[in-house]
Image (cartoon, rainbow, N blue to C red):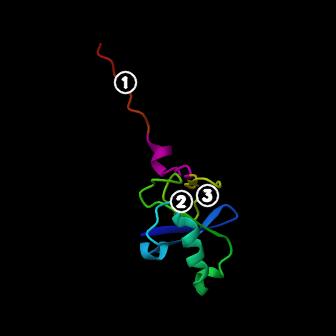
């Protein structure tokens, strides 16, 4: 299966799978323009603004397998930044155990 990500303004907006026969069973990178031409024939996908870039489910090329919201720098897909975890009540109420020394 071939995988393609729709990139608009350097952000992944959609990810789809295409049968290898629709890619003429070609390996990457030869399969990419064939896949882009195939996607252009599909009315529901062709109308979506952006560029369809081939990606690898196994992350064999283009960095990582993208999901919606991933970035794209023109070469590799980039995972979104992970936010810092929110503080919990324990972060404010847990007191350190006192140190008791033997006499």
Q: Using the image, determine if residue 83 lies above or below residue 66.
A: above
- Is residue 84 found inside the magenta-colored segment of the image? yes
Residue 26 location in percent, x, y? 46, 66
Q: Which residue is mark 3?
A: 71
Quick check: 5 left or right of 98?
right
In depth, the one of 83 and 37 nearer the eye is: 37
Q: Residue furthest bottom?
A: 43
Q: Using the image, determine if residue 80 lies above or below residue 67.
A: above
Residue 12 location in percent, x, y? 60, 65
Q: CA distance from mark 3 to mark 1?
A: 49 Å
For residue 95, what is the image quadrant? top left
Quick check: 23 left or right of 99?
right
Q: Which residues are magenta?
A: 82-94
Element carrying mark 1 = loop
Q: Earlier in the sequence, mark 3 or mark 1?
A: 3
Q: CA distance from mark 2 to mark 3?
A: 20 Å
Q: Nearer the viewer, mark 3 or mark 1?
A: 3
Residue 18 visible in the current orientation? yes
Q: Which residue is mark 1?
A: 99
């Amino acid at each position: 299966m071939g995988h393609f990500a729709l990139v608009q303004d350097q952000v992944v907006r959609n990810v789809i799978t295409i049968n290898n026969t629709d890619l003429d069973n070609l390996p990457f990178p030869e399969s990419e323009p064939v896949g882009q031409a195939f996607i252009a024939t599909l009315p529901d996908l062709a109308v979506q603004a952006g560029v369809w870039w081939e990606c690898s489910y196994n992350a064999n090329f283009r960095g990582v397998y993208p999901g919606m919201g991933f970035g794209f720098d023109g070469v590799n897909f980039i995972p979104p930044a992970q936010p810092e975890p929110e503080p919990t009540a324990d972060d404010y109420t847990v007191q350190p155990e006192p140190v008791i020394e033997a006499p």
